[in-house]
Amino acid sequence: MAFIGLMQPYVARLVDEEQKKYTDCFLCGEAISVNITPNYNEAKLHSNNRLKEYVKEFKDGNMTLGTDTLPIEASRVCFGHEVSEDNREVTYKTNDSANYVGVGFFADEIIDGKREYVATVVYKVKFGEASNEYSTKGDNIEFKTPKIEGVIAGLSNGEWKTTKIFDTESEADKWLQDIFGYKKTEPGGGSGNTSSASAYKTIKTK
């Protein structure tokens, strides 16, 4: 199998991990790269000069998300900063606290010549603030795109990630939207997303 594409990086604030409920979902720009590295606790038991038991269990993970841009919603949803009503000003305070968020995306995969779409949901991630790098224009144009890094934690039931294979992009995209309760931006700049409990959507994965 081979992954040949990456699309639709959704991010949403985790509000109830037991019920897998999210709010404030947004598209975090357009995907450039995603790197997920799980970390494990390990233990070995040797007896009679041989390895008798070996245990390897998920501990946590690291995630790096690279996109073409970091939308202003990330300042509020991911990092807990104050954002003005017109979404044009962000205030950074020393006591701002990052939120746990869920992250979803899908990738194109070729298996035996057939193209499929593998959607992935990482349930609980806390991102750190992205570093900012600026430079003046020179003889060559250079694109500088943001990357945010976070730590993955398991939910209270032990789950930390789910993947599902789809035949079409639209099916994969809809599955992610349904999980996070994503609603497209309404005319006039408003958003259909809401933080009210009545609008939360529960994830049900098998």
Image (cartoon, helix red, strand yellow):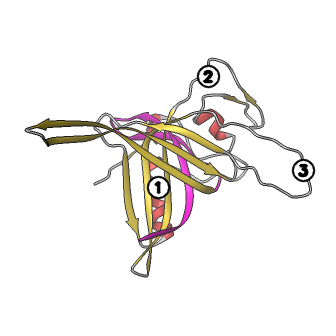
- Where's residue 126, x and y in %? 50, 34
Queried whether the magenta region covers residue 3, the answer comes back as yes
Q: Quadrant of residue 140?
A: bottom right
| Earlier residue among tags 3 and 2 | 2
Highlighted range, magenta: 1-30
Q: Is residue 14 above or below residue 141?
A: above
Label 1 – label 3 distance at C-alpha: 38 Å
The residue carrying mark 2 is 96
Left or right for 157, reference 185: left
How packed is label 1: few (under 14 Cα within 10 Å), some, or many (20 or more)?
A: many
Q: Quadrant of residue 77?
A: top right
Q: Nearer the viewer, residue 193 or 126?
A: 126
| Earlier residue among tags 1 and 3 | 3
In the picture, the disc for residue 137 is 3
Query: For the view shown, which residue lies furthest in the top direction?
Result: 95
Q: Main secondary structure of the magenta part?
A: strand
Label 2 – label 1 distance at C-alpha: 28 Å
Do labels 2 and 1 touch, CB within 8 Å? no
Name the residue: 36% across, 52% down. 162
Q: Nearer the viewer, residue 53 or 168?
A: 53
Element type where label 3 sits in the image: loop
Q: Nearer the viewer, residue 194 or 127?
A: 127
Q: Is residue 20 above or below residue 68?
A: above
In the picture, the disc for residue 176 is 1
- Where's residue 192, x and y in %? 58, 47
* Amino acid on which disc 2 is placed: Asp
Name the residue: 77% across, 32% down. 89
Label 3 – label 2 distance at C-alpha: 33 Å
- Where's residue 60, x and y in %? 39, 37
